[in-house]
Image (tube, helix red, strand yellow):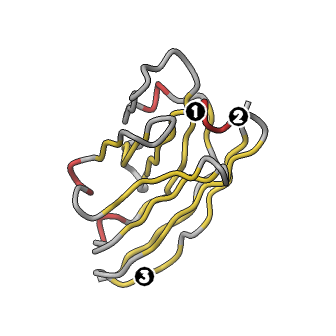
Amino acid sequence: QVQLVESGGGSVQAGGSLRLSCAASGDSYSRYVMAWFRQAPGKEREGVASISRVGGTTTDADSVKGRFTISRDNAKNTLYLQMNSLKPEDSAMYYCAGGRGSWPYSGVSLNSNDYNYWGQGTQVTVSS
């Protein structure tokens, strides 16, 4: 199994940027499809972005298209989320997740049920 630890959250004004990181340990990181999810108080967990095992395929939620970029460095066992043009509605706890299963080579998913392992989250707060 893999252990996931997020970092990089914080408070920023609208229009600003943050870069989240997720460090993985314990298992072969490149075997995992990875994703970022977020959850705001009183709301359901939302898939933000996902990336295939070797990073060749990504998908984003419509709400973040053109503003957020997911990437991974398999040599460093690290997942990233670059967040630009942040809005107050982006405020949430952000979680990284790893899924290991019978994924196709370019498989990605924003469905939380497809992920087996989760980090503890990092808080992002965007003020207007």
| Image mark count | 3
What residue do we see at 54% from left, 69% from top? 9
In terms of depth relative to the viewer, which is nearer, 30 or 116? 30
Q: Tell me where residue 11 appears, x and y as whole percent.
A: 48, 79
Up/down of 37 relative to 13, above or below:
above
| Residue at 42% over, 20% down | 104
Mark 3 or mark 1, which has the lower sequence index? Answer: 3
The percent position of residue 80, horizontal first and vertical second, equals 51, 58
Q: Quadrant of the N terminus?
A: top right
Q: Residues within 10 Å of mark 2 (few under 14, many from 20)?
A: few
Spatial CA distance of label 2 from label 3 is: 34 Å
What residue is pinned by disc 3?
A: 12
Q: Quadrant of residue 30?
A: top right
For the point 46% across and 48% down, the residue is 36
Q: Which numbered tag is attached to residue 28?
A: 2
Q: Residue furthest right?
A: 26
* Residue that mark 1 sits on: 32
Find numbered disc 2 in the image and state the secondary structure of the residue it sits on.
loop
State the separation of the CA atoms marked 2 and 1.
Answer: 8 Å
Q: Residues within 10 Å of mark 1 (few under 14, many from 20)?
A: many
